[in-house]
Amino acid sequence: MRHTLSVLVENKFGVLTRIAGMFSGRGFNIDTLNVGPTLDPSRSRMTIVVMGDDAVLEQVTKQLNKLIDVIEIEDFRDNEYVDRELVLLRVNVDAQTRSEVMQICDIFRAKIIDVQPKNVAIELTGNESKIEKFLFLMEPFGIRDLTRTGKVAVSRRQ
């Protein structure tokens, strides 16, 4: 099972290293990790996706709470948050396939950000399901390169 955690931390040197070290030292696996600033420049928000059952989630949460630079941990449950991921990929195209790739991009609201004679670079944002469907449709053309940001999430609470 995948768990999405939002972790508010002090924006200090070494915080990411301590958190990553806690995960590796305890044998927990981070599926995705994304870190960025918040409105308060003294704090950062980490979105961490962890694989494991509820017992693993409980242990991860307990261990994170022990770290001095961790301010708040929020476990996002289904329908309690919205999330997005950014994907940049380069896909092979030729005169016959270019228009088909462009049509699929239009359907998924993806942007073509670079055009070369034999490939195009594409930018897509969306939830994990949308990203996976788009990548599945791009595979037959030949994906030359791919990079993903990992999930970022925000609570739906008011």
Image (spheres, grey):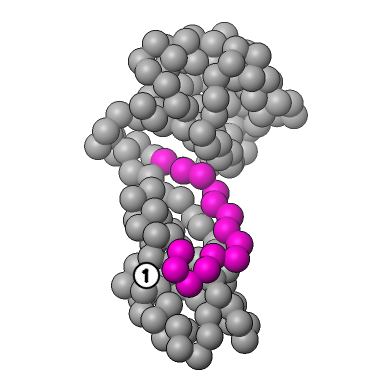
Secondary structure found at label 1: loop
User: Percent x, y for residue 139?
Assistant: 46, 64
Q: Dividing the image into 4 quarters, which one contains the N terminus? A: top left
| Residue occupying image coordinates x 37% and y 70% | 109
- In magenta segment, residue 152: yes
* Whether residue 119 is situated above or below residue 3 in the rendered picture: below
| Residue occupying image coordinates x 52% and y 37% | 32
* Whether residue 56 is situated above or below residue 12 in the rendered picture: above
Magenta region: 139-153
- In magenta segment, residue 96: no
Total marks shown come to 1
| Residue occupying image coordinates x 61% and y 62% | 145
User: Percent x, y for residue 134?
Assistant: 39, 62
Residue with the most extreme right position: 13
Q: Dividing the image into 4 quarters, which one contains the C terminus? A: top left
The answer to whether one can see residue 69 in this image is no
Q: Camera-side residue: 31 or 16? A: 31
Q: Quadrant of residue 76?
A: top left
User: Percent x, y for residue 51?
Assistant: 45, 26
User: Percent x, y for residue 126?
Assistant: 39, 55
Specify whether 112 is left or right of 74.
Answer: right
Specify whether 75 is left or right of 95.
Answer: left
Q: Which residue is mark 1?
A: 109
